[in-house]
Amino acid sequence: MALKKIEKNPSAFYFPLLIKNILQSPLNYNPEQEIVYRDKMRYNYRTLAERVARLANLLRGLGVEEGDVVAVMDWDSHRYLECFFAIPMIGAVLHTINIRLSPEQLIYTINHAEDKVILVNSDFVPLLASVKDQFKTVEKLVLLTDEGEQSQGGLEFAGEYEALMANSPAEYDFPDFDEDTMATTFYTTGTTGLPKGVYYSHRQLVLHTYGLVTAVCAYNSPVNVNTGDVYMPLTPMFHVHAWGMPYMFTMLGNKQVYPGKYEPAILLKLILEEKVTFSHCVPTIIHMLVTNPIIKDLDLSNWKVVIGGAALPQGLCKAALENNINIISAYGMSETCPLLTAAILKPHMLDWDIEKQVPIRCKTGMPVPNVLLRVVDSDGNSMPHDGESTGEVVVRAPWLTQGYLKDPEKSEELWKDGWMHTGDVGYIDEEGYLQITDRIKDVIKTGGEWLSSLELEDILSQHEAVSEAAVIGVPDEKWGERPIAVVVLHEEFRGKVTEQDIKDFYQRFVEKGIIPKYGVPNRVEFVDTIPKTSVGKISKKDLRNMYAGG
Ligand code: AMP
């Protein structure tokens, strides 16, 4: 028997999943709710919808047509939120530019994405001006400022955002179109080679929004949210659409707070004054907050934070919990929109004491509904869920990039055998939680055995003197590779903790059978800071260059 397809009445409307529909529900549910930008701007959802229409008219007036690419270089702002909607809603493609790229990477991505218009914050005008002679497709620039017109620093602008908005009509009839239309694109900087472009359709972003609702709102988890929560991103909006959270919180009509440039004093002020209850960030940001003495005097007990982008070390999780910051880990990547897993606690774990919950909260997590996730060996066979068998993580979900922009070879590598290859290695335990142990290229192979650099880092995070730590493999004649630890000590322990102390600490985990004897690093380097990537993660590439000759 053939499958029985549904019948479509000729008059029935086939409803495309489009971003424009996300913007409808807050207008019904909570039109007066606020969207806040620092202490600079505060408006409600009605105004948001009106400004999205103005921006659509503004862009059309600049010659933007369906299929054109419009790029944004801004801090996290209400303007960025407007771009998240208006640009895809007119059938154009939003290119979110990583503002920390080098000039070479910046111009490469602008030309590769074929940007036609760039909206640029005055803070990045000098950077953009430095590459303007190499523009291939850019026709118009729009200046974004907090204070109105400012000096133009070597670039010619079609105008300043607010002035252009004021002159644009506040109504726009947003069309329906195919849900597979490209809505967004951005670049992953990877560790080698040129940046690679990923891209997402309207359908994917809408489905991802519902995926987030399930993962973040529906489960009875310590960090779950509802429409009463106040949202502030702490992952830049250029990085995987701030994990898609602005789309979710807009759909739900929550109060949203956009902090502009991330400055610790302003972030803390906004959290307290605007009563922010939910954020997400890389571990570095939480580390920066919990190591700041001022935090002891603040009441952050209403603040829930999801950590992703890198492993959440247990030591950092405990430090956050001690400061009453409610924290769990989640996992995803630029190629996956990003949601894949979250460290959702199972019902029987909810009343565990915090100490017992910490290892679960730090797990990479459980695949959220509609994410299929396997750990496979080199022949693509699934590994057992035994908490030990380690292999590559491969995934399928409705919202994964279908390739790399204009790069069929790398796209094929990414999607070999119909599964997206994450380049991460890990295992799944009996409870179904994934634990990432390394990026494939960061795995330390010593005497033919794999060592997890993330596990060795997690152990260091539990040492009272250690503020931050990274472990990398360095070449070794006898063993192939050996681990070395790079450690930043808390101020009060500097000069007092020795290499031997750190090795002795590891030895305790050897004695408990947690790591093998050969897991104790050969060397410990005490440093003042650990280099970070453009999105604030520990840069193992830089560390290898420093300590392992690349
Ligand atoms: P990006 O594309 O810059 O977002 O980086 C994605 C990569 O970050 C993943 O492939 C992982 O290697 C790493 N990552 C993200 N979340 C986690 C996590 N919870 N634990 C460990 N690694 C993570």
Image (tube, helix red, strand yellow):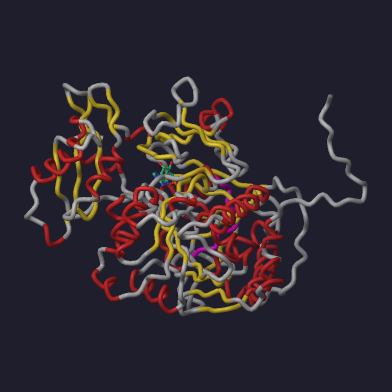
Q: Residue 319 versus residue 135: which sits nearer the camera?
A: 319
Residue 234 visible in the current orientation: yes
Q: Residue 316 versus residue 359: which sits nearer the camera?
A: 359
Number of labelled discs?
Answer: 0
Residue at x-position 22% and y-position 28%: 481
Residue at x-position 52% and y-position 75%: 36
Quadrant position of the N terminus in the picture: top right
Q: Is residue 291 magenta?
A: no
- Looking at the image, is 182 positioned above or below residue 275? above
Residue 5 drawn at (x, y percent): 84, 36
Residue at x-position 46% and y-position 75%: 275
Can you name the residue that lies furthest to the right here?
A: 10
- Looking at the image, is 489 positioned above or below residue 300? above
**Residue 464 left/right relative to 148:** left
Residue 520, image quadrant: top left
Which residues fall within the magenta stretch? 113-121
Which quadrant of the render holds ligand 1?
Answer: top left
Residue 270, image quadrant: bottom left
Residue 30 drawn at (x, y percent): 65, 74
- Looking at the image, is 298 positioned above or below residue 499? below
Taken as a whole, is the magenta stretch helix, strand or loop?
A: strand
Quadrant position of the C terminus in the picture: top left
- Looking at the image, is 540 positioned above or below residue 295? above
Residue 364 drawn at (x, y percent): 42, 45
Residue 137 visible in the current orientation: no
Residue at x-position 53% and y-position 34%: 420
Q: Is residue 117 magenta?
A: yes
